[in-house]
Amino acid sequence: MRQVTPTEGTLLTAADLAGNGVHGDDPDVHGKFGIFGGRYVPEALIPALDEVAAEYDRARNDVAFLREFDHLLRTYAGRPTTLTEVPRFAEQAGGARIILKREDLTHTGAHKINNVLGQALLTKRLGKKRVIAETGAGQHGVATATAAALMGLECVIYMGAVDCERQALNVARMKLLGATVVPVHNGSKTLKDAINEAFRDWVTNVDSTHYLFGTIAGPHPFPEIVRDFARIIGVEARRQMLELTGALPDAVCAAVGGGSNAIGIFHAFIGDQNVALHGYEAGGRGLETGEHALTLTAGSVGVLHGSRTYVLQDEEGQTIESHSISAGLDYPGVGPEHAWLKDSGRATYHGITDAEAMEAFALLARTEGIIPAIESSHALAGALKLGRELGPEATILVNLSGRGDKDMGTAMKYFNL
Amino acid sequence: MTTLQTVFAKAKADERAALVGYLPAGFPTKDGAIAAATAMVEAGCDVIEIGLPYSDPLMDGPTIQDAVHRALTNGTRIADVLRTVEGVAKTGAATLVMTYWNPIDRYGAERFARDLADAGGVGTITPDLTPEESGPWRQASADAGIDTVFLVAPSSTEERIQAVADCCTGFVYAASLMGVTGARDSVSSAAQGLVERTRAHTDLPVCVGLGVGNGRQAAEVAGYADGVIVGSAFIRRILDAPDEASGLAAVRELGAELAAGVRA
Ligand SMILES: Cc1ncc(COP(=O)(O)O)c(C=O)c1O
């Protein structure tokens, strides 16, 4: 059983990060969560991955590191983030209580900042002066550019050309923050191709550069490190739920792209068997159209971007291009820990179509005065459905992973605003 | 069928390095790949690596990405890869498949090893399969009687070189530089050191790839390695040619230059 209930004002502890063998669900020495995870990368990158893993192992047991991370989370990122109950929105959810974890209120506007600050500190410990990152919605790119500006690191962001267009505002933000944004014109011109290009940069510049990976996918140790730095979301939310309602929620809902915001809020609840964990993937135009990003729901086990996990692939192992109205969920892979949680039955994953997500997006804006990210709107739409299933007695915690300012271009088109 | 062992024994007897050429199946067309690889053999390549086109080639530079994209666009499938191997093996060159791991994983390791052996292939190079994950593939390959080649890199520690070499049969692939595939103006100075370090861990031949593109570079690498691997430079000749016939001529010309290089 885990006992991670730090009180307000106490310093982040090593146990708040998942390490130290406190939890039985760290990956094994090869980075495996059951059959998932591991490392499928060119040998040239193995020493760099080993170096990152070893430094992270030292860092998470180093009080000075934890203190610095904690300080940044409080004084720069704006943690702890609040909970907000949304009763007018919940009227559409059969009267169930819906409570949002407000990651949209963090600096830069999404949960990505938590992981980025942790890894930027790690970059300094590694003695590296340059960071690279992939980005889909641009939120991870903005967060990385932000941390790079804060810490005086050179920053290059790879972003699919399609995503550059639909998230133009974030491209401008990254540039203003001093980052170089490289549009990627290969393949589907979205997140998966940006990741390929970032790996090519890393293998070429690995001596000077840390690959600041943005989600819990990729080769070991990224799935573990990114989870641990995002884990604060659930650690806070679990304590806040107990304070606010006197009990744990019946269910926790989160959107799943690569899976970082979902694992961030799920992880502290994994030991609470009465708390159901629900992940929502992008259903795009619908499963039957083939235009979706339903990796866990409709994919099969394979290897993508260095990790064994569920993948959207054809019968010969070629990656199938995903589709979603939300750039952050438009990815044909998923973090190996989610694959493991799915197969073990501890978490359940569902699809939400573009239309359902956009409806929830507009509903939250109108009923509660909060404009969510389209990614997060998938979790909101999931909570509406779940509330109707569970009934008025249920309490549902939703990770509002980001704010919707970046999505106004898409919304203007979609709603003819 | 020519095995890797006979190729390297013969090259050694001739006091030269072996020449290894790479080309993706399906590039420039399905039949064009067989024709181009055959031209490479006729010009002097001892070993041919047939690339299995994959949607996410994350260790390849722009030239191979471009070729692979064309191959996938013209509908190249694993059956075509095997057919290409069959066609090339008939020339008498030892023929390997170079592939990212996922296509084999999905096809089934045992089935792929068997089908490759049946097509006359002598082994595989799997650049993203690490020793830790390679057990099932090495078993399947041993059962089918084909070789397994893995990569070492300039960044590899002594322990890693040992672990990789222990998984190899046929030869060890030494990546000359930290980076993606593609011809370079000069061969990385890291290559020779890596070959020497690798020799301390294995008696297998050590071949150098990444960045070799002309006869002078081939001669330089042949001075310390057992084999010289060239891919992007061949592809570049085909990409730059106005038509298939002149592409083949350019491939022959480069092949002859490289073959002279490994004999210099
Ligand atoms: C606000 C927001 N939520 C969710 C995601 C999806 O990523 P993940 O599944 O890693 O949380 C993104 C990615 O860009 C995002 O910006």
Image (tube, rainbow, N blue to C red):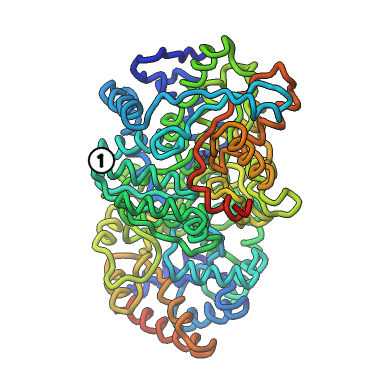
- Which percent across, then down, holds residue A222? 43, 38
Q: What residue does disc 1 label?
A: A151
- Look at 40% across and 14% down and name the residue there: A8
- Which percent across, then down, holds residue B39? 51, 83
- Look at 26% across and 46% down and name the residue there: A153
- Confirm if mark 1 falls within 8 A of ligand 1: no
Q: Is residue B153 visible?
A: no
Q: Left or right: where does residue A253 sit relative to residue B205?
A: right
Which is more toward the observer, A382 or A120?
A382
- Look at 47% across and 24% down and name the residue there: A82
- Which percent across, then down, holds residue B254? 40, 82
Figure check: B136 above or below A392: below
Q: Left or right: where does residue A193 sit relative to residue A342?
A: left
Residue B12, picture quadrant: bottom left
Q: Left or right: where does residue A349 sit relative to residue A162?
A: right
Q: Residues within 10 Å of mark 1 (few under 14, many from 20)?
A: some
- Look at 50% across and 41% down and name the residue there: A217
